Structure formats: C-alpha cells, structure tokens
Image (tube, coloured by chain):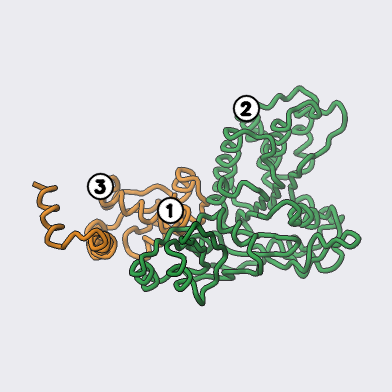
Chain colours: A orange, B green
Amino acid sequence: MDEGRPIFQQIAERVENDILTGALSEEGQVPSTNEFALYYRINPATAGKGVNLLVEQGILYKRRGIGMFVAAGARERISARRREMFVLEYIAPMLAEAASLGITPHQISQLIEEETS
Amino acid sequence: MTSQNPVIQVDDLTRSYRDVAALQNVSFALQPDIICGLLGRNGAGKTTLMRMLTGQDFPSSGTARMFGENPVENSAVLQQICFVSEGQRYPDGYHARHVLAGAPWFFANWDAAFADALVDKFRLPLKRDVKKLSRGQQSALGVILGLASRAPITIFDEPYLGLDAVARQIFYDALLADYAENPRTILLSTHLIDEVSNLLEHVLVLDEGRLLLDQDAESLRGSASAVAGRAGDVDSFAEGRRVLHRDTLGGLATVTISGRLTPADHRAATAAGLEIAPVSFQQLIVDLSTHPDRRPAVASVAYE
C-alpha cells in the first residue's frame, strides 16, 4: 500500500486492475470485504469502503446473501475512464519532462516509433 | 456513516497529579466496533486516559463514560472491558495456564480454543511462572488475553513490548482476522505507527495531555504533502497554506503542507519546477506532534 493516499481508493484501483487484466472476469465473484482486509492487512471497514466505491460506480454489484460480482461491461467502462486519464497521468508529465530536457514533441514521436518498431 | 450511540464518551476530562496536568480538557466520542489507535509520544497521557476509561483512576474534572456509564466500580461495565496493560502483575507461582484458566470468570465471551491456538502461534510456555517469562512472552500472554476475551471494548496499552517482528505480525494478523469475524471496539496505543496504521479506522493523537487529533484514519491519509524545490519557489507556493514542517538543504527546501492539494495546485507546482510527494501516515503524526502551534490541522477533510 502506498502510505500517502487513502487505502480505499487503492483497493478500488487494485480490483479495477484485476478486472482489466482479466484476473477477475465479468459476472465472476470477487473476494469478500473480509478476505480483502486480511489479504492486504487493512481494516475491514476500509476494504468495504473501497468495494462500495466500485458498487456505486456500477463496476461491482451485490447479490444479497451470496456476495459481490463484477458487472457486465465493467472492463470497458474502466478502460474508457483510464484512457481519459492517460493524457493527464502519462502524456502531460512526459511532455513536461521532455521540455526540461530540450526534447521536442517531434523527437518524442520518433522515440516512440523506435521503441515500438 | 451511521451515527450510533458512542461506546466511549469522554467530556472535558482533566487529570492532574499535584501540579502536573496529565490530561487537559480531553473530549471525544468513539462509535462502536471500530479499531482506534491512540497515538502520542511518551508522557502524552495515553496510559492515564486508558486508566480513566477502565475505572482504575479518577478524573480531576470532566467525565469518562463507557456504554453511557461511569466505569468506576461499575461491574456491569467493567465485565465488558478487557484492559491489557503494560506490566500486568500476577501472584507468585502463577503460570500462564492459570491466567488462561481463570479468564472465563472475567470474560463472558472467552474463547478457550482461540486462546489455545494463539498460545501455539506465540509459542508461549504455559507451565512456567509468569514472573519468569521473558518480556515478549509476558506481552504475548497479554495479547492472548485481550484477543480471546472478545470483550465488547478491548484496550491494549502498547501490547508489543519485547515482541519480535514475527510475533507482532502474528498479533496484527490475529487481531484483524478475529475482529473481522467478531467486530468489537478496540483501542490500541502504540508507538509503532507505521506497523498498525493500515489496521486503524480511527485515530486519536494525544500530546502533552491534550487531544491533538480525533479523526477518521482514511481522511488523514493523503491530507498532507511534501513540496520540494528551490527554497524561494517552495516558499512562494507555501504562502497562505498551513506549513507543518520545513527542512532546508543549501538553496533547496522541503515543506510539509497540510490540506489536500487540488489538480490546479499540482499543475502550479509542476510549472514552478517543484516536486510533490505524499507524506506517510507516521510522518504526518510526527509533524503534527512537533509543530509549534499544535492545533488540529485537519479536523475533517472531504475526499477529493
């Protein structure tokens, strides 16, 4: 866990990551709040808050008496949101660092081409 | 958050010993079934507070109520409380097995099988005089009592003294697992903030007898940032904000700023060539406790 951020957000992100990679499949059951708490060694209320955040966003849903499941379409919704954040979290910092090193946007495209060819 | 009747309610509690004020005008209320950390430096008043809560000492003024009642000589209340204090004394010739055998007399919810499992995990010798156990073994005995008692309010006063890293992990894991199955109110005083911070739902910080912080642990996390860069740039960024701590190295400075930074703050900092780093839970408590005008920095901070 990263000490400087609320843990419930980090739990929600980890569950999202597992949905993105397919480790948790749509309509598949996710671990219980207590299982999350014991695995990550965090307070169960905190784990519950992370899970509830995803329920509010429609990523997970509850089946009364059975448990928590990944909603259909969750994967696409998560990746759509992450794509929006991609510019802010990856492209913008990269451009700022490039500017301070005197690397032009054109040179960046060339570097990307080289890396991916 | 649902607001129930607080299980522990302290109002304007003051305890003076001659001219020393061990606790000064402390007020807080704890909701049931949470794990709360009681943090603070040596001499901050943690043990004094715990002794008031468990009816072992009397307030000079103010009140401490457990389940809405005064705990002093109140057996109905005291039966619901397990207080694991430092340096618990037992009669001569008393073995750990005697302590455990007597526990059901005091604790209605005592789980003997759970206690046995913990004895194995901690490798606690049962047939030895408690006085001859090592400091760590005595602490393990206290931890076992505290956990297996399943008391509705369980209070641990620095229960880890002499416990090695492995034994402390056993304690934290057992506490979490058993709490998850059997929710109850846990009040835990500790100096090892980093080790327990993820277990806590709520935090109380005492300093020199005063309550410095009474806050949800999650809202505390990320509620301060360290901003580093050229001293002039750092100081102009910090102007008008609450600075908890400032370090300098040559022409460079790092300040700890209280309060959540907005995306606009982040952009401004990046544009000024400043670096922003999160402040750990423990560091934030340390900064708050050493700040010259120690007043609650973040009484309540909304997410995002």
Co-location on one chain, circles 1 and 2: no
1 vs 2, front mark: 2
Q: Is residue A81 visible?
A: no
- Residue B223: x and y in percent read 50, 64
- Asked which secondary structure carries label 2, the reply is helix
Are discs 3 and 2 less than 8 Å apart at CB?
A: no
Query: Going by the image, does B244 lie left or right of B207?
Result: left
Q: Is residue A39 left or right of residue B111?
A: left
**In the depicted view, which residue is nearer to us: B191 or B273?**
B273
Give the quadrant of the N terminus of chain B: bottom right
Disc on res. A65: 1
Most extreme residue toward the right is: B18
Report the chain holding disc 3: A
Mark 2 Cα-neighbour bin, 10 Å: few <14, some 14–19, many ≥20? few
Residue drawn 32% across the image and 54% down it: A16
Q: Residues within 10 Å of mark 1 (few under 14, many from 20)?
A: few
Q: CA–CA distance between discs 1 and 2?
A: 35 Å
Farthest residue to the top: give it. Answer: B127
**Residue bearing mark 3:** A22
Which numbered disc flags the more N-terminal residue, 1 or 3? 3
- The residue that disc 2 covers is B120
Amino acid marked by disc 1: Gly
- Please state the chain letter of the residue tagged with numbered disc 2 in the rendered image: B
Distance from Cα at disc 3 to Cα at disc 2? 40 Å
Q: Position of residue B23 (x, y in %)?
A: 79, 62
Q: Amino acid at mark 2?
A: Asp
